[in-house]
Image (tube, coloured by chain):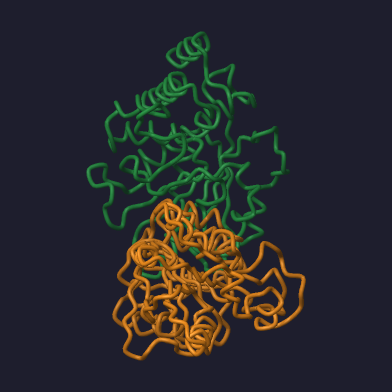
Amino acid sequence: MRTTFINTLIERARIDNRIFLLTPDLGFSVFEKFIELYPDRYLNIGIAEQNAIGIAAGLALSGYKVYVYSIIPFLTMRCFEQVRIDVAYMNLDVKLIGVGSGYSYGPAGATHHAIEDISIMRSLPNMAVCCPGDPLEAKQLIEQSFSLPGPMYIRLGKNNEPFIHAKDDLVKFGEASILKRGSDFALITTGNMLEQGKNWIDNWISEGYDPEFISMHTIKPIDEKSVLSIIERGLNIITLEEHSVIGGLGSAVSDIVAAAGSSCKVAKVGIPDIFSHYVGSQEAHRKHYGLASRPDLHVLGILS
Amino acid sequence: MMNEVIRSIRKSILTMMHYSKSSHIGACFSVVEILYTLYFDILNIDPNNPKKPYRDIFILSKAHASAALYATLAYRGLFPLEWLDRYYIDDGILPGHLDMNAAPGIECSAGSLGHGLSIGLGMSIARTMRKELGRVYVLLGDGECNEGSVWEAIMLASTLKIKNLTAIVDYNHLQGMGREVINQTNLSERFKAFGWNSVDVDGHDLDALKQVLSAISPESPSAIIAHTIKGKGVSFMEDRLEWHYKSPNDEEFVAALTELERAQ
């Protein structure tokens, strides 16, 4: 998705001279082509994220569309108040492109894990939050960000994620992608859990179930209609995200269910409310913290 | 001779602080001459066209002195003087800290310290990259310079050899809990060590301010360390920490107003 981001940005920068790329000293081997083509619309700020966001705001106030790229915790948390005031409060055209969602940087340790970012970013007024789940979603959401004027956080995984969508699928910002209609229960995933969600769906189908499968690539504004449609059909919901169970996709979906006064059950599969002290890859982390194994529908109480 | 606009600005600030019972009158009085010089002598702006392209930009990073900016903007003609009657009150127009949507001429929202210089630097970079005219001025508090983000911006500005940026430090020696909680001596030398041109000036001397604000370093970003007195202009508020917080009661309001009216 990292490569998808930069290639999509390079393509757009050719026809839109407002595009400006900032990095607080990350992106080695990612940005070389952009720098070569548009040296006057790129800046490495140095390892100073607060300054990077302030500068992004100053550039946006001067007419640029600014993309700031970094590893998620440094992009969203180190400089959260700059994001809050300089970007969100002033409602500026600044897009925050975070890499390393969830346990992507597993063995690097908890400093590099991104497990609370959706929660804090979606609480900011004016801030849109997107978590693309495959390169197709990443490309189309980044393309749509070019014509969205306000602040936006785009949460990317790593690189070389497989395509889950069909090649000609259309992804729309703010609209859930319904990958499969179903009548037994619904699985809603966001971001880099899309691939695993697909595997679970395939397994459930082979066991004779008929699950609905939704990719909620836009967490804010969330597509309420897609959730209300599930509720109206009397289905229970499993949410799946590589993010804390506090404040992410599961919470956003639960809010809709609660507000609707529905008795629909929401089972949240996500990262428990703990910092990892475990050492291991993303895959190993997922296993260790219970995200990898397909839950038993009976235990979850999902089959009504 | 007392400049009559400056006298009016101070009287407006005093009145605003009194009716709204709000804080920071000391911080406001500290910067009146700096704001006056910028808005009446230095900045290329058009009150009838506040968004004029290629204008100069002023950012009040120490936004707790917002009342001083509002009064200056009103006297410069950016918005009606009556708006000053609706500061920091229910259904008001002008908030305690800056909201760029509140009134014309406010270039940037602010209120948490350590943000403004980075934003100003971003604007300077934009103008540099596009080879545009227009200079960016950012006013910081000396206490604000405790914030590490200020120094992030200072380091990068000189690295990029930014020439269209001026940082002014309101050096009144008093911050939230006391006198130079963090040692601020040799501020000019500190800026110079980070690659800036820096000069010291009496922050209440209009001629001196005009001179240093007009003389711009052609090589590097410019810092101006303005030596000021917190609460300047009202004797019982000058250099007194409590006027960071207190708002004048009725007796203090009358005494301060009388003193401002009588000042020669």
Q: How many marks?
A: 0
Q: What chain is the orange one?
A: A
Q: Quadrant of the N terminus of chain B?
A: top left
User: With respect to residue A197, does B136 lie above or below?
Assistant: above
In this picture, residue B50 sits left or right of residue B95: left
Instruction: In the displayed orientation, state which residue is furthest to the front.
Output: A304
Q: Residue B20 at what x, y percent from top left?
A: 44, 23
| Residue B79 occupies quadrant | top left
Task: Judge whether residue B213 can be spotted in this image.
Answer: yes
Task: Write the residue at 49% across / 40% down.
Answer: B63
Q: Residue B219 at what x, y percent from top left?
A: 51, 64
User: With respect to residue B231, does A41 lie above or below?
Assistant: below
Pick the front one: B173 or A272: A272
Pick the front one: A283 or B151: A283
User: With respect to residue A123, does B78 lie above or below?
Assistant: above
Q: Quadrant of the C terminus of chain B?
A: top left
| Residue A41 occupies quadrant | bottom left
Q: Colour in which chain B is shown?
A: green
Q: Residue A228 at what x, y percent from top left?
A: 36, 62
User: With respect to residue B54, does A7 lie above or below?
Assistant: below
Q: Residue A22 at what x, y percent from top left?
A: 49, 71
Task: Write the residue at 31% across / 57% down.
Answer: B54
Task: Write the residue at 44% across / 75% down.
Answer: A184
Pick the front one: A178 or A122: A178
Task: Judge whether residue B127 can be spotted in this image.
Answer: no
In this picture, residue B73 sits left or right of residue B239: left
Pick the front one: B159 or B248: B248
